[in-house]
Amino acid sequence: TVIGRRTEMKKWFTVLVVTLTICMMNAKAEAVILDFEGLTSSTAESLVSNNQGYGGFIWDTLGWYLYSDTSYPNPAHSGHYGLVNNYGANPIGLSSASPFDFTGAWVSGWYFNSPQQIKAQGFDAGDVLIAETDWFPLVVSENHFLEANFEGISRVNFVGGQYFTVDDFTFNENSEDPLPEEENNNVIPEPATMLLLGSGLLGFAGLRKKRS
């Protein structure tokens, strides 16, 4: 009946509006991936010598080195550049004036003197430890994802030793005052946002089908 079709159309329209509204609310929650590409043309260079503040972070000055996998036997997870703790501190880390959520990073053992395992720790603005991962085994020259899922932290430390690599450092902004955007950040939508958007499109398709 006409009334039945109108009721069904209203239902689909409501689903579409609610879904799109939720998508817009979640649009700010975007994962940022620091891939360390385009920062240097050198085969190896201290990160902080020319790129302190990369990704909106303050990187520890002792140890973080950019390296190219065209010159070293440790493959980057993406592209050709990664980060290595070279003669660095233990622990070594990075911090931010704005709180953020740390999802994780791809890590591997360096081709010599690699520690067998590392872990990540998250600290609040008062430098209080509020989260940490289990010990994570490292494989030399083979990248694996160290999952953290720390929320509302101001600093990440990597603990366990020197000579390990980090690539595709992944985090979410978690502040009304977002971290500065960097040209070399790859911003990707959260999977949940993409799923919600897909649901909205399906709802819209259903609405059009009912109208026909």
Image (spheres, rainbow, N blue to C red):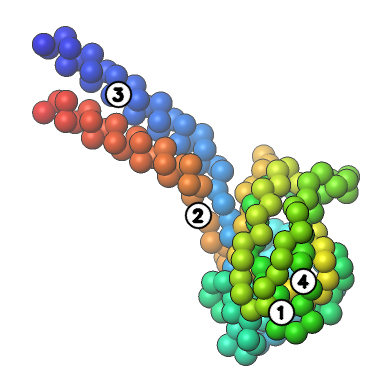
**Element carrying mark 1:** loop
Residue 135 rendering spot, x and y as whole percentages: 76, 59
Residue picked out by circle 4: 116
User: How far apart are the alpha carbons under marks 1 and 4?
Assistant: 10 Å
User: How far apart are the alpha carbons under marks 4 and 2?
Assistant: 32 Å
Q: Is residue 145 above or below residue 47?
A: above
CB under 8 Å between callouts 3 and 4? no
User: How far apart are the alpha carbons under marks 3 and 2?
Assistant: 28 Å
Q: Is residue 29 left or right of residue 179?
A: left
Q: What residue type is labelled 4?
A: Gln
N-term mark: 3 or 4 = 3
**Residue drawn at x 78%, y 50% as measured from the top left:** 132
Q: Is residue 160 left or right of residue 23?
A: right
Q: Which amino acid does label 3 sit on?
A: Phe
N-term mark: 1 or 3 = 3
Residue picked out by circle 3: 13
Residue picked out by circle 2: 188
Residue picked out by circle 1: 110
Q: In which quarter of the image is residue 66?
A: bottom right
Near mark 1 (Cα within 10 A), the count class, few <14, some 14-19 or many ≥20, is: many
Near mark 2 (Cα within 10 A), the count class, few <14, some 14-19 or many ≥20, is: few
Give the camera-side residue of 46 and 193: 193
CB under 8 Å between callouts 4 and 2? no
N-term mark: 3 or 2 = 3
CB under 8 Å between callouts 1 and 4? no
**Element carrying mark 3:** helix
User: How far apart are the alpha carbons under marks 1 and 3?
Assistant: 55 Å
Marks 1, 4: nearer the viewer: 4
N-term mark: 1 or 4 = 1
Q: Which amino acid does label 1 sit on?
A: Trp
Marks 4, 2: nearer the viewer: 4
